[in-house]
Image (cartoon, grey):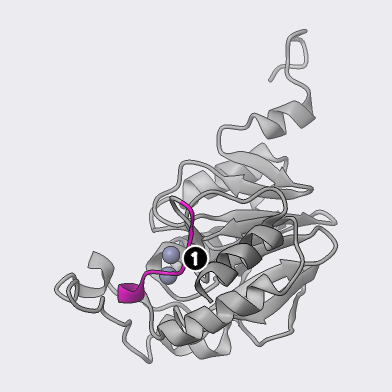
């Protein structure tokens, strides 16, 4: 990265070819090489918002991604978890400590995050795998979210309550950039699919939420698991919903 190196990669290309971060849409980055569960960075006016954090012990990798796109840890102002599951909140504590970011969760998932409610164990036949095989932990929630709220560090990022997978599951919609952060309301692992019923609180509600997300307009959809959908995402999701709905 020396400026003396005539073959040095220009900043823009370095962003796209980064080892940890790649730009999936204007100012929106997916992070590579985490564990279970995806994590995305939303950049607006020099401030960063992180959507989900993957499974624990990879906070360093998320900070590497932030550095790669030219930011300091303190530029991370907000961490939003789409829901309480450990593959979305696993690195929250470490990242809040190292960045000072505000941690936000929907009101209906706050009791699971802050330790007042036990996590839902996997349903039969997987119920023997206690709570996804991870130690339960609790996290202080600094800001409680509700449907229609806007994230302060990203004024085009609107909260959509999309319950079912968990009671307080949310998606986030950026109308200006035409992007949906879907969390686990829908997955794109070997094609579009609903969240796993064995790990979901209420599948009827989850189906309603998927239908609601299909009614919005967005080019790009970024699921909590599986590959980003980078074009005509809301059309593809509406077709998928029609196939089962
Ligand atoms: Zn998940
Ligand atoms: Zn989940």
Viewport quadrant of the N terminus: top right
For residue 134: magenta? Answer: no
Image coordinates of residue 128 in percent, x first then y, are 14, 73
User: Residue 136 falls in which quadrant of the image?
Assistant: bottom left
Query: Up-down: is 201 above or below 42?
Result: below
- Residue ID at (65%, 37%): 68
**Category of crowding for the residue at label 1, using alpha-carbon neighbours closer than 10 angstroms: few (below 14), some (14–19), many (at least 20):** many
**Residue indicated by mark 1:** 92
Image coordinates of residue 185 in percent, x first then y, are 52, 71
User: Residue 243 falls in which quadrant of the image?
Assistant: bottom right
| Secondary structure of residue under mark 1 | helix
For residue 193: magenta? Answer: yes
Q: In the visual, does 45 lie left or right of 241? A: right
User: Residue 119 falls in which quadrant of the image?
Assistant: bottom left
Residue closer to the observer: 73 or 121: 121
- Residue ID at (57%, 75%): 210
- Magenta residues, start to end: 191-199
Q: In the visual, does 84 lie left or right of 6? A: left
Q: Is residue 68 among the parts visible in the rendering? A: yes
Asked whether mark 1 and ligand 1 are closer than 8 Å, the reply comes as no
Viewport quadrant of the C terminus: bottom right
Q: Quadrant of ligand 1?
A: bottom left
Q: Is residue 104 among the parts visible in the rendering? A: no
- Residue ID at (74%, 27%): 13
Image coordinates of residue 242 in percent, x first then y, are 59, 71
Query: Up-down: is 231 above or below 103?
Result: above
Image coordinates of residue 6 in percent, x first then y, are 77, 7
Residue closer to the observer: 20 or 163: 163
């Amino acid at each position: 990265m020396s400026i003396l190196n005539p073959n040095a990669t220009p900043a823009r290309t370095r962003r796209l070819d980064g080892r940890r971060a790649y730009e999936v849409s204007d100012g929106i980055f997916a992070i590579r090489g985490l564990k279970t569960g995806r994590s995305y960075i939303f950049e607006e006016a020099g401030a960063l918002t992180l959507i989900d954090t993957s499974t624990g012990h990879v906070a360093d990798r998320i900070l590497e991604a932030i550095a790669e796109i030219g930011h300091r840890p303190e530029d991370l102002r907000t961490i939003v978890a789409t829901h309480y599951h450990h593959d979305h909140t696993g690195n929250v504590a470490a990242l809040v400590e190292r960045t000072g970011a505000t941690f936000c969760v929907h009101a209906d998932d706050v009791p699971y995050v802050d330790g007042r409610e036990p996590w839902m164990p996997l349903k039969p036949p997987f119920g023997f795998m206690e709570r996804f095989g991870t130690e339960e932990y609790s996290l202080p929630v600094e800001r409680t979210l509700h449907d229609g709220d806007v994230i302060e560090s990203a004024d085009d990022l609107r909260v959509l309550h999309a319950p079912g997978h968990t009671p307080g599951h949310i998606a986030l919609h950026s109308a200006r950039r035409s992007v949906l952060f879907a969390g686990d309301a829908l997955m794109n692992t070997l094609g579009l699919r609903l969240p796993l019923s064995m790990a979901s609180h209420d599948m009827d509600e989850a189906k309603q939420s998927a239908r609601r997300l299909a009614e919005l307009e967005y080019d790009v959809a970024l699921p909590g698991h599986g590959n980003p959908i980078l074009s005509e995402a809301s059309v593809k999701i509406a077709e998928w919903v029609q196939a089962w709905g």
